[in-house]
Amino acid sequence: MRKFETLLLLSPELAADAREALLGTLTGVVEREQGKMVAADHWGMRDLAYPVQKHMRGYYVRLEYLAPGEAVAEVERNIRISDGIFKFVTVKLADAVEEVA
């Protein structure tokens, strides 16, 4: 298992319940791929340095999870086909992390 972090920039027009449903879907994908969600930090609404899809504000969420390397491709595939996600970036935080029960 490796430790990954994915930062999402969500549409400011996305309702709170739609955001939670979207994050629930991504959590389900991680767990389906034999991973484990460690943290989901809601950074909230922030101003953007430049317009993204004609918006100057966006809602940021940081996901941290343990998963095999192949799971990242599936998570990113689900992000790409989801409406309401403007941008995302995934970073590997650590190799070979031992899962604490």
Image (cartoon, grey):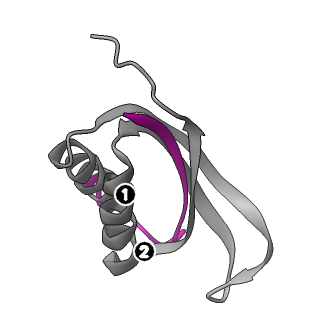
x, y (%) of residue 40? 45, 37
Q: How dense is the environment of label 2, judged by Cα within 10 Å: few (below 14), some, or many (20 and up)?
A: some
**Could you tell me which residue is drawn at 62 percent across and 65 percent down?**
58
Give the answer, above or below, for where 100 lies relative to 36: above
Disc 2 designates what residue? 84
Q: Label 2 is placed on what type of residue?
A: Gly
Mark 2 falls on what kind of element? loop
Quarter of the rendering containing residue 82: bottom left
Q: How dense is the environment of label 1, judged by Cα within 10 Å: few (below 14), some, or many (20 and up)?
A: some
**Along the horizontal axis of the image, is 75 left or right of 7?**
left
Give the answer, above or below, for where 68 lies relative to 19: above
Query: Mark 2 or mark 1: which comes first in sequence?
Result: 1
**Along the horizontal axis of the image, is 54 left or right of 92?**
right
The boundaries of the magenta stretch are 1-21
For the C terminus, the quadrant is top left
**Could you tell me which residue is drawn at 27 percent across and 38 percent down?**
35
Disc 1 designates what residue? 19
